[in-house]
Image: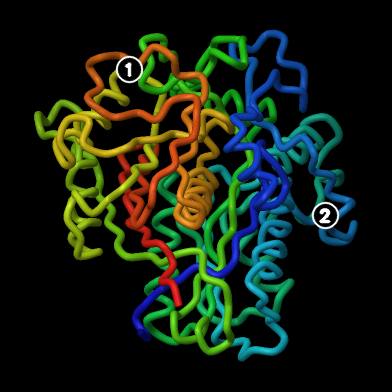
Amino acid sequence: MSDRTVFTGIGVVAPTGLGTEAHWEAVLAGKSGLDRISRFDTDGYPVKVGGEVSDFAVGDHLSSRISVQTDHWTHMGLVAADLALADAGVTPSEMDEYELAVITASSSGGTEFGQREIERLWSKGSDHVGVYQSVAWFYAATTGQISIRHGMRGPCGVVVSEQAGGLDAIAQARRALSETSQVVVTGGTDASLCPYGLVAQMSSGLLSTVDDPLRAYLPFDRNANGHVPGEGGAILIAERGESAAARGAQVYGELLGHAATFDPVPGSGRPPALKRAIEKALADARVAPQDIDVVFADAAGRPDADLAESAALAAVFGPHGVSVTAPKTLTGRLYGGGSSLDVATALLALRDGVIPPTVGVEDVDPRHRIDLVGDQPRELPLRRALVVARGYGGFNAAVVLGAAQRR
């Protein structure tokens, strides 16, 4: 029992809602968080649609002392961590501070903060650049701020593997729990919906330029045109199974397996490594493909990338061999926060026995030999879920989650 890693708390700050149940309710209702970007004027930009956290006012959650020192991405991470700790019933001050760890994921760091300070440098000079520029942009800022806020002095770190980072951070949390930690705050958030952040993302050529929020992000669809960028994510509380049982904590589910791989160099003739990541995650969990009830797909939204993913799934599970869903069509891709939000959503699906829908995808390309869940939720007795993620540059990750053991 001591080697079990269970999840006892979830905190969500996402385009679909602030708070876990608000997010889950929106997902099951198919309520999209995608809309025209409002954080800045997108005239002159080919990308118009994004997934913004519209109901988030930092002053409602954090003191001005903290908010002026940190980026929007860290604001959301701090609030999500507060929500997750409260949900888990964990009071850090009552625990050994050296047994409390923080391991999060980030992709872009403090982009909005950095843009603002660079603009001040250009327009007014170095005397007008805030002193916190030196730390607020850094990828580990959210991890550090969570650690400071809650007095967590155990292992702390950040994983930077783009969309795959949330899964890799959770795997690092499991490693920390197998050593000296008792509780780990993990997952991730990201926020790059500012001019600098958007231009940086556009350089990849992977973003959708469709300006209709309902048609902009259509993974596995004949009309797939790229992905929609979003902000937010989820923070989770990972805990030793024996610790959770001793304090009578609720358990959403269990981390059964993880694997990560890296794609070969383009042009090498070697196949993508996603299939291997899935197979290794199943092996780590000691389960067979037929033991998986649902796959939460990476869903890149580009025809070539979608075909590579669906081919990997068909190769492992057989054509149309497992239910596949992509609820991120409601949020966009959240980069460092995306796969951790998928984990949170998968844990809720396991809890309630319902697979969330893939909203908006109405014309599935027949080349995808997968059983894609459509616009309506699918109720099934769920035991295990696979979450798949790919990060820009060749990162692949997969985790296997198990439903909470009933007492």
Q: Residue at x 33, y 44 (%)?
A: 395
The correct choice, above or below, for 246 with respect to 47 in the image is below
* Residue 303: assigned label: 1
Disc 2 residue crowd, few under 14, some 14–19, many 20+, Cα 10 Å: some
The residue pinned by badge 2 equals 67
Instruction: Locate residue 175 relative to residue 369 in the image: left or right.
Output: right
Spot occupied by residue 228 in the image (x, y as percentages of width and height) = 54, 24
Residue 390 percent across, percent down from the top left:
36, 40
Instruction: State the residue at coordinates (48%, 46%).
Output: 342
User: Up-down: is 156 above or below 112?
Assistant: below
Q: Viewer-nearest of labels 1 and 2?
A: 1
The amino acid on which the numbered mark 1 sits, given as a three-letter code, is Pro
Give the label on residue 172, or none: none
- Direction left: furthest residue: 269
Which residue is nearer to you in this view: 317 or 41? 317
| Placement of the N terminus among the 4 image quadrants | bottom left
Q: Which kind of residue does numbered mark 2 sit on?
A: Ser
Residue 15 in the image: state x and y as whole percent: 66, 36
Residue in the picture at 28% in, 20% down: 304
- Indicate how the structure is coloured in the image: rainbow
Which quarter of the figure is the C terminus placed in?
bottom left
Q: Residue at x 30, y 14 (%)?
A: 365
User: In this image, 56 relative to 292: left or right?
Assistant: right
